[in-house]
Every structure is written in structure tokens, then in C-alpha cells.
Amino acid sequence: MITLPLLFSSLLFSLGHGKPPHEALQLLNFINSPKPLSALRNARWALSRSSSAPVYVGAQDGLMEADKIDSLPGQPQGVNFEQYAGYVTVDPIKGRALFYYFVEAPEDPGSKPLVLWLNGGPGCSSLGAGAMQELGPFRVNSDGKTLRANEAAWNNVANVIFLESPAGVGFSYSNTSSDYEITGDRSTADDSYTFLVNWLERFPQYKARNFFITGESYSGHYIPELASLILKNNAANKNTVIQLRGIGMGNAYVDSNTNEKATFNYFWTHALIAGETYKNIQSSCNFSASFRTADCEEAIYVARNEVGNIDLYDIYAPLCRSGSNVKSTVEPDPCAGDYVTSYLNLAELQKAFHVNGHLPHSWRLCGCCGTGWHDSPSTMLPVIQGLLGSGLRVWFYSGDQDAVVSVTSTRDSIEQLGIPIESQWKAWSSDDEVGGYVIGYKGLTLATVRGAGHMVPSYQPRRALTLFSAFLKGGF
């Protein structure tokens, strides 16, 4: 076994006094969990592999119509777009099925691209996080029973699928309990690919549509792995050819050693730790080593106490105080995850969503995987390097107030790729003010979002929509 970053173990303690957002503890717990060396194998597996077994393709006749949603409980008046939700079987023998929620664009959906959104974790819900708290058409009100419109929803400019993956996340499930004990990057990529092939059979009008994959956090693993698998199977003429045109990853966790080192740099440059503490960490910690010295542990312990009890996913945001009678007056509401959990466990909501009535547990924001995550390469950079030569549009974007997967980490990761700059750093605008900054590399774009935390569309919805529109067009 190897010992993974101790920083996050320490910071879990400081997060415990307030309620962090949905993905915070999930990713921090994952980073801190001990993993066998076999689970951290080099990421090059994704560069050369295609599915080793034939991909299951089931009959989809009539299922699109069956998945159509008449209306959601408590939805606002004037909804003018189509909604669908249901299950796509990815393994009929084991009884494994993935749940999706799909929203079409309100205006001219036939001319707009198809986009898949994936939340990270690993093991967090794209429905409860992405759709209901970030970029979907609705936000859940504090009563946990009604919805309000999100004017900056991404389905204004695209048709968007929110996928709960892998099995065990949200409403997705397997009838074979051992499936939950073997979940990892490889199985998640395989099942997501099988989902897409079958979903396109169910919605054949989208087969020729330009397709993009977007997401955040641990989707820095999910997205490159799925994109690589799609390209390999497209080249082999396997199954439906998926018209993949680009990938966009927000505050993406792609390289573990770079990420930890960059976090301390971010702490220091944002006045969260003392200069002396930062110097001690630099001199005593080897971030590429498989263990931590006593001096390094001591320096990290000091940093933990200096940072204090804050939300590391947005260093300037308030924490959720569950049970408080004081209603939040900030956006995003730090308790939004509580409202979503209440809403998605309503019986009438699950009926409208066509949810399997025999799930073994109630809906939850994060959690899926029995004894843990079974394969996770320590770096995705070789996979991303391989994608850069494929002609795909590759974008990273970073909310600049996230300390866990900071813009510092993303910049350091891109630097490791060694690709030349093609367009210099500049500001981009949203609503007549600076929305963030952008730099273009050969085959890759990095954009920041000013004033946003880890879940960018939650913190800065209008700027996020401007960014997303630029991504689809290929630039600002």
C-alpha cells in the first residue's frame, strides 16, 4: 500500500464543523484513501484500448416516448422544452442500468448540439449536482418541494444529458451486488460508452448531431477516458459512430502529485497560510514520494490550523449550518444540496422520473461503491496528450476561488504537457464585465471564471453560460 496526500486528511477535519458541498468530502476522501499500486497504474491503458467484448445494444423501440416527462412536481409555469428521464440497460445479464435526465433546448433543438454532463466524486450524481444545482433548467427551492427556473441553464444553447454513473450513484443500479465491489475508472468508461450507444438508438435523431462531453472535478478522469474509448471504437467502426467534437473539463482532477503541490501554492498566494509555513512545506515535502516525512506532516498540520474552517471548494463562501432557522441570503445557497436530496426523494418526483421503485436505498448526492474505487491512474496527462492530436476541441476551465482543484493545479498540469502557446492570456467578457481570462495552447484552451468556486455554474451561472457557449463555438 502507499500513503496518499496527508493534506486532505488534515483538511477533512477542518471541514467537519460546517457542511461542505456535495463533491467536497467525496473527492477529499477519495484522494486520502489508501490505494494499492495496481490501482494507480499508468493511464496509457486508455490510449490503446477499445472495448474487449462486444458492446450490448438492446431494443429501444418505444422507449423514448415512454421516458418523456409530462411535468415535474412543483415546476414553474411556462416550461417550453421537452424533458425525458429513465434507464438505459448496460448489462442485461447482471441487471445493470444507468439513469439519465435529458433536457432539450427550448428553441430549435434540432439545430443545437448534444452534450453529456458528468459530475465527479467519484460517485457523485450528475442529476442532483449538475442538473439541480448547477447548469440544469431548474433549481430546487428551500422547501424541498418546488422548483424555480435557472435563466442561465445550458439547455438554452444545447440539448443536455445528465448521466448518473457508475451504477450505484443516484438512481442508477445493478441487480448484481458484486458489481459495486469492482467499480473503477475502466468499468465506468465502458458502461458510459455502452449507455451512449444505446441512448442514441433510443433517440436516433441525435445520431448525426455534433456531440460534446463536459463535467467537473473527478470528471478529469471520466471525460478523457470516455473520449479516448469513443475515438478508438469509432476508428474500429464498432457500433454507432458517435460524433464527438470536443471535451470541456471544469476544475478537473487530472494529476495527483501536481494537484497537491499546487494546492499549497494556492493557499499561500490567497493569504490562507503564513509565508513561513509555505516555505516549510516547500523544503520538507516531496510531493512525488510515496510517503511523508515527519517534518512534512508537521508542516501540513500547521497549514491545516492556519486555513481554519472554510469551504475549500469556494474559499470565500459561507458554510451550510443545517438546522439553522436563518435562511441563506447568498447564491448559491450553501444548503442547496439538502433541498435537492429532499426533492429527489419525493415519491411524486420519482414517479415523474420513471424511477425503479425497488432501489435498495434512498436517493443521495454521493456514494456508490462498496469497498472503494478499484482503478484510478495517478495521472490523466498521457490520455489528454493523446487526445490533443485527434482533432478534438479540448478545454479546461477553472473557477478561481476553488482551493481543492485550483486553477494553479490546472496550469501546472498543462505545463507538463509541454505544448506551445498559440494565443496569449487575455480577459473575456460576460454582461459587459470581465468574466475571466483565457489562454490558447496548441490543441487546448484554458479559461478561468472570475469569482467562481469548484462548481462553476452554481457560483457564476451567467458567466458559466457565456463560457459554455464559447466552448461550443470554439472560442470567445
Image: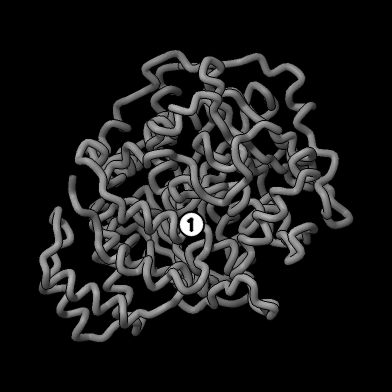
Q: Is residue 357 left or right of residue 179?
A: right
How dense is the environment of label 1, judged by Cα within 10 Å: few (below 14), some, or many (20 and up)?
many
Q: What residue sits 57% from the left and 51% below the top?
A: 365
Which residue is identified by label 1?
23
Q: Residue at x 14, y 57 (%)?
A: 291
Amino acid identity at mark 1: Glu
Q: Residue at x 55, y 28 (%)?
A: 195
When asked about the image quadrant of residue 89, the answer is: top right
- Colour mode? one colour
- The part of the image, by quadrant, that contains residue 225 is top left
Task: Answer with the quarter of the image where residue 77 lies.
Answer: bottom right
Residue nearest the observer in this picture, 68 or 81: 68
Q: Nearer the viewer, residue 422 or 351?
A: 351
104 to 273, vertically: above or below: above
For residue 196, say whether it is visible.
no
**In this image, 55 relative to 406: left or right?**
right
Q: Position of residue 314 (x, y in %)?
A: 48, 71
Q: Is residue 315 above or below residue 423?
A: below
On screen, residue 131 versus residue 233, left or right, reads: right
> How many numbered markers are drawn?
1
Residue drawn at (44%, 63%) of the image? 398
Q: Position of residue 34 (x, y in %)?
A: 26, 49
Furthest residue toward right: 77
Image quadrant in which the N terminus is located: top left
Residue 155 % position (x, y): 69, 49
Residue 55 position in % (x across, y down): 48, 17
Q: Is residue 105 visible?
A: yes
Q: Under tag 1, what secondary structure?
A: helix
